[in-house]
Image (spheres, grey):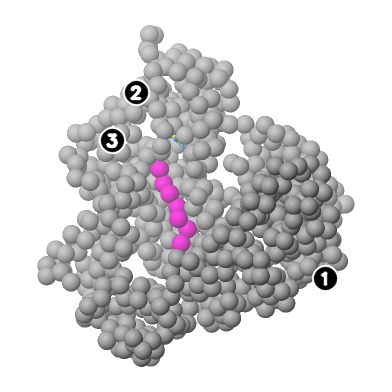
């Protein structure tokens, strides 16, 4: 622990952490490891807990969220938060320029900024003397909702600017405007987590961002990783010496204050250059990592922008060039049902073909029956369908006003359409399932997954081959794949010597895939790559995983109740037991090769480490515990078996004592291991 007095130390910690998050979230070149960051962060938490007086609004600990926010207070914006008029073609843009030219002195040359039109929500953020003091939604443009505690949880918004030492001092009061959104990777991760917990998935990033920002409890917002990009100054610069005269400089000014601004903003000399840049933007769209619904063209010169004025709530000096709508309406004719490898049933809407965002679609996912019920979607409805990014088109909802009374409810099937088994609807999950592990459709989907890139990645083994082999009765389960012979494969249509050799080689190679990959390929619901790795690292062999109870599984950091139960149920199924025996017999990898365990002395025990240990570092203690079969978690709960405590242990020690969790010293731990191994 540091010798500096708390007040000074807290300030140093705040500065460091603020700077390190900037390096991590904005410049993407982390200056320290996550562990180093966490250690400093924990030190700050401890100091602040000791003396709450030391907590300041710009402390990184304030991102954790607070439960104090009630209904939102209202905030009056210092200037109207304007909107944008739209253009849909190059002609529209030329016409817009011409209208503007007429309002300006002859010979005025207009240059422009070109920015992505971020498909999120407007955010208005106030910094006072560089400290984030307020954040509000657009509201009605004049008055917005105060969402400050929620916005403090957004990692890439600095709580204090500038983060990096620079010659810039922000004005006494700086109000800036930007957009809050989900990066697609964060959105996908959020949905994976939802799926793994049996919870409904979020449908689109924009609405989910909106929902997250408007949570009453900012701790919930803190669990939804939002991102913000800023693009404008609402007020604050006029009275300040730094007074960028154009938008381009303004964007750079924001960047210099270490605020996040949208990637790929451009400064272009004239309208022709803007128009020439449009195709590049359209192509870039798919790789941006977040959704945009167009680009925004703005008059660069701020004096001219001002002079052009406002019509209604749209400034004349800026325009949104919008991409063709990705939504359309059409009739929902019928619903088909697909059964996935885990038995999960997904309803798909069969539509009157309709042209959306450049392609004709005739079916769209309905996600699940909860979604259908929540949105009151009925057979025969006119529905809105949407395509966004690369995701499969989905039904947004019905146009209720268009109903004629002949619509019919969409209900989950009673029997599996492929094997006629009664459909199951387990408690606490949204989805319906075909529970029959021998359902032909499930087997086909599982085999297809097993050989795919996401599974064992068997080269030359595609969906078509899976179908052929099943049809010919050459395989019935995963293990059969490894028993295929040259002669059998040569009987398949289109399979000649070379193709057969390649396939056999691919199959052979698959036997060497590591345990994590084998576990993933088994297709246990909720066990994707991440969870499979947790399981492989903890249990080391499929045999010990097979014997694990729900309680054992719950000691693994990152495994929750739903997954624990699914895993246990999967291994309890006789069909899966037989399958595993066969897979083992054909020589698949059933053990982690990397880290062979030293012993089982701490098998199924979970530890939390606190304070400074006499000889081991925390990492060494963690490795030691894991090498002997135990696991290490970061927070204490009822599942914790022992607290390993060293010098100057803090709040964790109190908590362990309160919960009656036994406390071990480093010497106790080592004695336990030695007693077991006799080393
Ligand atoms: S500028 C001059 N720039 O689009 C100030 N708006 O359809 C007017 N938006 O309400 C706004 N990205 O929420 C501007 N780069 C960008 C934008 C952007 C997204 C949103 C903004 C606005 C809406 C208008």
The residue closer to the viewer here, 604 or 306, is 604
Query: Which contiguous range is marked in magenta?
Result: 223-230
SS at mark 1 in the image: loop
User: What's the mark number on residue 422?
Assistant: 1
- Where residue 73 sits, quadrant-wise, is bottom left
Which residue is denoted by mark 3 in the rendering? 253
The residue closer to the viewer here, 555 or 225, is 555
Q: Residue at x 75, y 47 (%)?
A: 464
| Residue 536 percent across, percent down from the top left | 51, 69
Q: Residue at x 34, y 37 (%)?
A: 233
- Where residue 677 sits, quadrant-wise, is bottom left
Packing grade of label 2 (10 A; few <14, some 14-19, many >=20) is many
In the rendered image, the vertical position of residue 95 relative to residue 286, given as above or below? above
| Residue 436 percent across, percent down from the top left | 78, 69
In this view, the mark in front (3 or 1): 1
| Image-based side of 199 in relation to 616, left or right | right
Q: Residue at x 31, y 70 (%)?
A: 619
Label 1 vs label 2: CA separation? 68 Å
| Image-based side of 152 in relation to 191, left or right | left
Packing grade of label 3 (10 A; few <14, some 14-19, many >=20) is some
Label 2 vs label 3: CA separation? 15 Å
Which residue is denoted by mark 2 in the rendering? 301
| Image-based side of 2 in relation to 603, left or right | left
SS at mark 3 in the image: helix
| Image-based side of 331 in relation to 394, left or right | right
Residue sitting at the far right: 406
| Residue 180 percent across, percent down from the top left | 45, 47
């Amino acid at each position: 622990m540091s010798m500096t007095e708390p007040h000074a130390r807290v300030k140093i910690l705040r500065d460091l952490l603020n700077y390190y998050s900037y390096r991590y979230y904005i410049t993407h070149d982390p200056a320290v490891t996550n562990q180093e960051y966490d250690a400093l962060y924990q030190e700050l938490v401890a100091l602040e807990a000791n003396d709450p007086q030391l907590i300041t609004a710009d402390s990184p600990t304030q991102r954790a969220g607070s439960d104090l926010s009630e209904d939102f207070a209202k905030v009056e914006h210092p200037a109207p938060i304007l909107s944008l008029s739209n253009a849909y073609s190059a002609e529209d843009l030329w016409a817009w320029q011409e209208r503007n030219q007429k309002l300006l002195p002859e010979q005025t040359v207009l240059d422009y900024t070109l920015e992505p039109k971020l498909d999120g929500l407007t955010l208005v953020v106030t910094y006072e003397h560089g400290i984030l003091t307020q954040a509000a939604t657009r509201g009605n443009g004049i008055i917005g909702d105060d969402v400050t505690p929620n916005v403090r949880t957004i990692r890439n918004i600095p709580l204090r600017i500038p983060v990096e030492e620079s010659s810039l001092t922000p004005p006494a009061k700086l109000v800036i405007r930007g957009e809050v959104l989900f990066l697609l990777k964060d959105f996908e991760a959020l949905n994976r987590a939802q799926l793994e917990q049996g919870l409904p998935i979020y449908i689109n990033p924009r609405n989910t961002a909106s929902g997250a920002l408007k949570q009453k409890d900012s701790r919930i917002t803190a669990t939804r990783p939002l991102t913000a990009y800023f693009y404008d100054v609402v007020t604050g610069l006029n009275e300040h010496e730094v007074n960028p005269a154009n938008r381009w400089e303004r964007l750079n000014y924001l960047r210099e204050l270490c605020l996040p601004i949208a990637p790929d903003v451009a400064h272009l000399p004239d309208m022709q250059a803007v128009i020439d840049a449009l195709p590049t933007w359209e192509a870039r769209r798919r790789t941006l990592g977040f959704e945009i619904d167009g680009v925004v063209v703005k008059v660069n010169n701020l004096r001219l922008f001002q002079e052009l004025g406002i019509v209604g709530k749209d400034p004349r000096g800026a325009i949104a060039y919008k991409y063709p709508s990705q939504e359309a309406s059409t009739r929902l004719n019928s619903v088909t049902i697909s059964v996935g490898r885990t038995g999960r049933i997904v309803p798909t809407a069969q539509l009157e073909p309709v042209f959306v965002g450049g392609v004709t679609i005739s079916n769209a996912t309905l996600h699940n029956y909860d979604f259908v019920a929540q949105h009151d979607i009925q057979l025969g409805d006119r529905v809105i369908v949407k395509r966004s990014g690369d995701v499969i088109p989905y039904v947004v909802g019905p146009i209720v006003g268009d109903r004629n009374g002949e619509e019919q409810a969409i209900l989950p099937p009673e029997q599996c359409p492929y094997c006629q088994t009664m459909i199951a609807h387990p408690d606490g999950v949204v989805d319906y399932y075909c529970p029959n592990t021998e359902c032909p459709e499930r087997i086909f989907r599982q085999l297809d997954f097993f050989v795919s890139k996401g599974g064992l990645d068997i080269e030359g083994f595609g969906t078509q081959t899976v179908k052929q082999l099943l049809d010919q009765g050459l395989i019935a389960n995963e293990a059969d794949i490894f028993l295929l012979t040259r002669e059998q494969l040569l009987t398949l249509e289109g399979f000649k010597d070379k193709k057969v050799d390649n396939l056999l080689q691919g199959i052979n190679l698959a036997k060497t895939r590591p345990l994590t990959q084998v576990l993933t390929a088994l297709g246990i619901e909720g066990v994707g790559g991440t969870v499979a790795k947790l399981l492989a690292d903890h249990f080391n062999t499929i045999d010990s995983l097979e014997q694990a109870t729900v309680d054992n599984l719950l000691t693994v950091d990152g495994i929750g109740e739903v997954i624990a139960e699914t895993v246990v149920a999967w291994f309890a199924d006789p069909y899966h037991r037989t399958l595993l025996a066969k897979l083992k017999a054909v020589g698949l990898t059933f053990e982690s090769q990397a880290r062979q365990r030293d012993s089982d002395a701490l098998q199924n025990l979970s530890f939390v480490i606190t304070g400074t240990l006499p000889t081991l570092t925390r990492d060494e203690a963690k490795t030691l515990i894991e090498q002997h079969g135990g696991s290490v978690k970061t927070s204490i709960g009822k599942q914790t078996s022992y607290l390993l405590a060293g010098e100057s242990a803090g709040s964790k020690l109190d908590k362990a004592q309160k919960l009656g969790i036994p406390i071990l010293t480093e010497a106790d731990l080592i004695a336990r291991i030695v007693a077991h191994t006799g080393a």
